Every structure is written in structure tokens, then in C-alpha cells.
Amino acid sequence: MKKQHLLYGIRNNKLVHISEVEKGIKCDCTCPACKGRLIAKKGNKVIHHFAHYNADECEYGYQTSLHLAAKEILLNAKEIFIPALFLKIPFSNRYPIKIVDAQMVKIDNVEVEKTQDNIIPDVIVYSLGRKFYVEIFVTHAIDEDKLKKIKKSKISTIEIDLSKIDREITDEELKHFILDDCEEKSWKYNVNTELWLEKFKMIADKKAISVRRMAQHIDYCPIKMRTYRGKPYANFRDDCIYCEYYFGDYDNGILCTGSKMIATKEDYLNYIKNNNKNIIMD
Ligand code: SF4
Ligand SMILES: [Zn+2]
């Protein structure tokens, strides 16, 4: 792993950037992780950074300092950009369905280091009556166990992946990664994908699979993918899993929206509107 320089220290219980402190021991800072004394190295050769005074560098200093800095940024921000949300249909090769557009959302409140359902999210953001978690990935991505707990608690979670940035991140850059549109930001879990998958499944037709020799056929394919002696059908492996109307399997068949021509969220909403279905829309 590349050497990561510590750019933030703690002074008078406040996080300070290396640019804000005096050179040397006069910086009067401690390490955000191990609380050890720091020295500010502000020479000409190496990027300005903190080092542990009379001690080895500690393992978590860099990670903890970026976490704290990210939290500080969110605490002072009014808005955060959230990435678009896509629903991937399990075991299908169809394109993912856009569920929510990328957008700026207002930040009403922010909480840090607060235990929720056995998880300690890096940051909890409250926005327009909802909340979501923001996880900052510096050296440790969200692990299986944490993801499982997040899914169980049904709180949508964005991860900002700073692990591949192979240079020191300035204060301004960190602000950009946290608050703006950038490819380092992605949804690790979003409750809306589950809700929308359920909606599509509920409206889909159940179509049985007929096994004929080595092939698995769906008889009466609504979009007439293939025909045999005038009778429409589809081949599960060659057609359905690539089809925009395929929404997964049930016991002995597939879930297909071909008869209603619902391939996207907009198709679904139009269908409901045109058919006056009394279904709660999200
Ligand atoms: S998923 Fe597509 S190809 Fe398969 S039966 Fe339905 S409409 Fe036909
Ligand atoms: Zn330390």
C-alpha cells in the first residue's frame, strides 16, 4: 500500500488541516486515531503532513482523519449529490432499470458515530424526512457483515470510495468527493430497488417453462420472439434472460411483463395511470 500522509490532526478537540497549523511540535496537535502527539512536517521536499512525534506511524491515523474530515464537511454542508439508482434484475442480462435520477438533495441534519441497529454508520444524513448512511471507504470497504445489517435495517447507504486515489487528497478535493457528482460515489444498498423489484414482480404474468429435450421454452411469448407452426414461443436461455420484459423466476417459470409492455419505471407508472390501478406509487 502506498504511504498515506496524515493531513489532519486534532487541536483543542477540533479537526485541523496541516495548512492551518504551525510547523513542528508547535502545531499542538494529536493523532485522531491513537491520540499520540503529532509534529507538523512542513518542509520543501515532501507534501506537508503530520507525523507521530517520537513514535511509529499508527495504523488507523490516515483513515480516521479522513473519516472525521468527511463528517465535518457534511456537518457544514447544505446539499449533497446522490448518484442515480438502478435496479438490476437478478440472473438476467437485461440492462438495469433506472429507479431514481442522480440529484442534489438538501441536508436537514447530520449525525456522526451514532449506533443504529447494531451498526455504526460513518455518517447519517437526514434529508426531507428520510435518512441515509454515508460510508467513507479509505482502507476498509463495507464488509459482508455490515452490509447484511444495513439491509436488515433497510437504510439506504452510499459509499464514497477514496481507496484508489493514489495521491494526497486536499481539503477542497475531499469536499468535492463528498458533496459533488463523482464516480467514487455509489449506492451499496437502496431500499427502493427492493420495493421496485416487488412492484414489477407483482404486475408480471407467471409463465411456465416447458422443457423440450435440451431446451426450455415459454409458450405464447407475448412479443412473439419465435414462432413454430404459427404458435409464438420464446427460448428461456437465448431470449428471456436478455429480454426487457423479464423480471426473474418463480417456482417453475418466469415473471414476464410482455403482455403489458412494462420494461421501465415510466412504463409501470403509465400502465397504472391508464388502468386506474389503486396502487400506492412511490
Ligand atoms: S420474457 Fe420476453 S422473451 Fe420471454 S416470454 Fe416474456 S416477452 Fe417473451
Ligand atoms: Zn496515531
Image (tube, grey):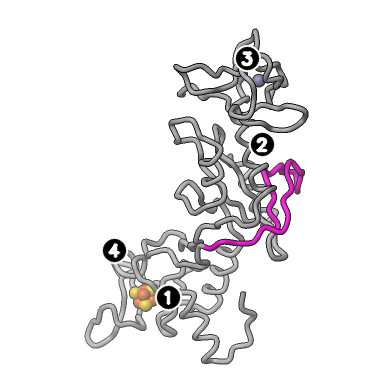
- The circle on residue 24 is 3
* First in sequence: mark 1 vs mark 4: 4
Q: Is 3 on the left-hand or right-hand side of 114? A: left
Q: Position of residue 158 (x, y in %)?
A: 58, 51
Q: Secondary structure at mark 1?
A: loop
Task: Give residue 2's quadrant in the image.
Answer: top left
Residue 114: in magenta span: yes
Quadrant assignment for ligand 2: top right
Tell me whether circle 1 and circle 3 mark residues in contact (CB < 8 Å).
Answer: no
- Who is closer to the viewer here, 254 or 212? 254
Pointer 2 residue: 68
Q: CA distance from mark 1 to mark 3?
A: 62 Å
- Who is closer to the viewer here, 192 or 40? 40
Q: Is 225 on the left-hand or right-hand side of 123? A: left
- The circle on residue 263 is 1
Residue at image position (60%, 30%) is 63
Task: Reply above or below: 176 against 277.
Answer: above
* First in sequence: mark 2 vs mark 3: 3
Q: Secondary structure at mark 4?
A: loop
